[in-house]
Amino acid sequence: MKHFDMKVLLYTGSEKIFTQSGIGEALRHQKKMLKNLNISFTENPDEEYDVVHLNTVLPDSWWMARRARSKGKKVIYYGHSTMEDFMNSFRGSNLVAPLFKKWLQVCYRQGDIIVTPTEYSKKLLLGYNLNKPIFSLSNGVDTTFFSKNKKSGDRFRKKFALKDDQKIIISVGHLIDRKGIVDFIDLAAKYPQYSFYWFGNTPKSLMTSDVQKAISHATSNVHFPGFISAEELHDAYSGCDLFLFMTYEETEGIVLLEALANETPVLVRDIPIYKNWLKDKEVVYKARTQSDFENILPLILEEKLPPLTKIGHQEALRLDIKNVSLDLANLYDKLFDI
């Protein structure tokens, strides 16, 4: 069967739980890819389908995989999660991390193939002894939607009553240790002349005590507007002066791709996933320690370092959804050869 003859089930099971996360965005990107490929798809598991995409490791997704396999359907399990990026996230996550890894193994082994966003996350999953073919495929980014727009930037600044000369730093993600929220707040305290905005939401009950304490003691130049829509996020990328990504672990980082697509200056933590992919001082600026962030941040904001946004934009174009769609089509062909 060729991929253009088939129908895909995008299983959304417990969608409400993850719709405001990177996994939810990945699922929306998969819809766009299938539309680009003119492949029919459904979100109703009771309809006929040939291939199912599973994006979470919640119990209902495991059950859906079993159900699909019993009917002779092909299963693509997306490896968005690893034990490594589960650690240092929510309250108690480190305690249950080894059990979480075992559960990941149970889930991912239900796939005919496993698709994970980067070569870095593929390398991690290869160490999980899954005994299944693992392929790396970016989540992609919609460079048509996320593109620099002055009107969008003006709208962001007007909404938050920001002066034209006010330097604005933004970050996006869950309010968890792994994302670097505590370091973000500490850094803001060093630079009261700049305004720091963190977009994202996490129930307080899931936050660690360190995160709760940091947020409660944040200086007045740190703002937490909560979760915002894609349109509002586009405005923020267009209106800010820097996207600051202090994360300690990622399988890709869709928000980073969005910032690059939007030609927003980027300062990211120097972690293994970005080592060979996004070159320091060529595509993005990197910092390893808190002291590094303190030193580099003002140099970017005061334009004392060369701009990298045009090169960063080229990297985003390479990972545009339309380009990634073609790689997905090739994976379908491999899927039916297994």
Image (tube, rainbow, N blue to C red):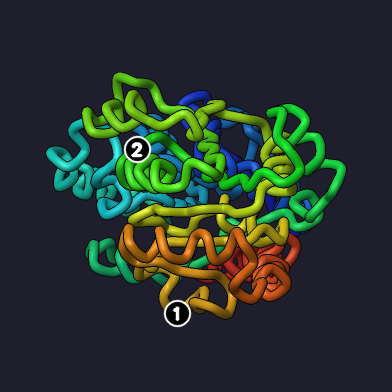
Dot 1 corresponds to which residue? Answer: 276
Residue shown at 40%/56% (left/top)? 250
Label 1 crowd (10 A; few <14 / some 14-19 / many >=20):
few
Residue 327 screen position, x and y as percent = 64, 69
- Quarter of the image holding residue 12? top right
Question: In the figure, 101 relative to 4: above or below?
Answer: above
Q: Amino acid at mark 1?
A: Asn
Residue 153 screen position, x and y as percent = 78, 43
- Image mark for residue 289: none
Residue 59 screen position, x and y as percent = 34, 32
Dot 2: element: loop
Q: Quadrant of the N terminus?
A: bottom right
Q: Tell me, yes or no, if residue 13 can be seen here.
A: no
The first of marks 1 and 2 along the sequence is: 2
Q: Amino acid at mark 2?
A: Ile
Q: Is residue 26 left or right of residue 105?
A: right
The residue lying toward the viewer, choosing from 163 and 306, is: 163
Dot 2 corresponds to which residue? Answer: 176
Q: Is residue 230 left or right of residue 71?
A: right
CA gap, disc 1 and disc 2: 26 Å
Q: Tell me, yes or no, if residue 50 can be seen here.
A: yes
Dot 1: element: loop
Residue shown at 57%/31% (left/top)? 45
Question: In the figure, 150 relative to 232: above or below?
Answer: below
Question: In the figure, 159 relative to 186: above or below?
Answer: above
The residue lying toward the viewer, choosing from 97 and 211, is: 211
